[in-house]
Image: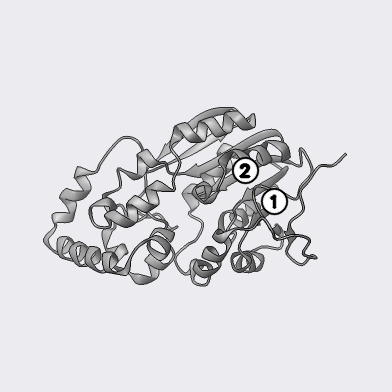
Amino acid sequence: MCRKKTVTCIGCTVDSMDSLNIAMAKYDQIGMMYDTTRRADPVLVTKLAALLRLEKLSYLDIACGSGNYTSALAEIGGRWSGIDQSGVMLGKARMKSVRVNWFQGDAEALPFCDDSFEGVMCTLAIHHFPSLEAVFSEVRRVLAEGRFVLFTSTKEQMKGYWLNEYFPVAMERSIEQMPRMSEIGAALETAGLKRIDVVPYFVHDDLQDLFLYSGKHRPEMYLDQEIRRGISTFSSLADQSEIDEGCRRLREEIGSAKIKKVIRDYENERGDYCFVVCE
C-alpha cells in the first residue's frame, strides 16, 4: 500500500496547510526579488549531477526554492520533482521548467509514496528545518536504492567566514540556526541513512549563485543592497543599524586594502560549504 502524507500540489486542491511554518512567509518575502541575484552556478550543477549519479531516473529536490538547481539538473537528465513551502518561490520555479513537477508542502510530510525516487537532494536549506530527523526520515521513506545529497554549510564552517568581522550579530544568529556536522550525522543515522562522504567546497572567484559567502573573494558585493536582499542572513536576521555600520567599515577597508588582511586571517581548510553524500 502506498504511504504518503498530503500537502498541496501547484494547481491542485488544497487538502492541508497545517504543517507549513513561518519559513514559508519569510521566503515568500525574499522570493519577490530572489532571482535577481540567485541563479544556478554551473560548477555546483555539475558537482550535484556527479554526486547524484544522475541518470534517466526519478529525482526529488527538497526545499527547491525558485527551482534554479532543479531546472538546471532536469536539463541534464532524469525525471524531477521539486517541493517547497513558498508559493512565491514556486511561482517562479514553474515558469522556468515544465519538465519538473512542482509541489507546495512541508519537507516533514512529503506527498509521495514509499520508494518513489532514485535520488534526493537539498541545497542550502537544512537550517530552516525544525527537525532534521523528521525530514531525513521522510527522505529515507521516499528514497529507493539511490543517493541523498546535501549541499550546506555547518556551524564550524560559518565561524570561519570573514563576514563575522563586519556583521557579528547577524552572523551569530545565522550560525545559531545552522546544525553542526555531528548533528547532521546523528540525524541521518537516526533516519536510517548512511553518510558515505563529506566533500568540502571552497567558494570560487566567479560563483554565479550569490548566496551568503559567495562574496568571499569579492567583498564589494556586500555593499550592494540587491545582493543582500537575496541572502536571508541580511534580509531576515540582521538589524539595519548593524548593516549600515558593517557596510561603512567594509567600504573603508576595501578602499585601504585592509580587507585583504582580514580575508587572509580567516582562511582555513574546513571548506566554506560541503556536500554530504548519503545512501
- Quadrant containing the C terminus in the rendered view: top right
Q: Is residue 47 above or below residue 38?
A: above
Colour mode? one colour
Among the two numbered marks 1 and 2 on one chain, the one whose residue lies closer to the N terminus: 1
From where the camera sits, is residue 213 visible?
no
User: Residue type at mark 1?
Assistant: Trp
Query: Where residue 189 appears, x then y in whole percent?
Result: 58, 28
Q: Quadrant of residue 3?
A: top right
- Please name the residue shown 59% across and 38% down the image: 133
Query: Where residue 118 appears, x then y in whole percent?
Result: 71, 38
Marks 1/2: CA distance? Answer: 19 Å
Tell me the residue that label 2 is attached to: 135
* Label 1 vs label 2, nearer the camera: 2
Dot 1 surroundings within 10 Å: few (below 14), some, or many (20 or more)?
A: many
Q: Nearer the viewer, residue 16 or 49?
A: 16
Q: Is residue 183 above or below residue 209?
A: above
- Please name the residue shown 24% across and 44% down the image: 266
**What is the number of callouts on the image?**
2
Residue 80 is labelled as 1
273 horizontally vs 84: left or right: left
As drawn, the residue found furthest toward the front would be 18
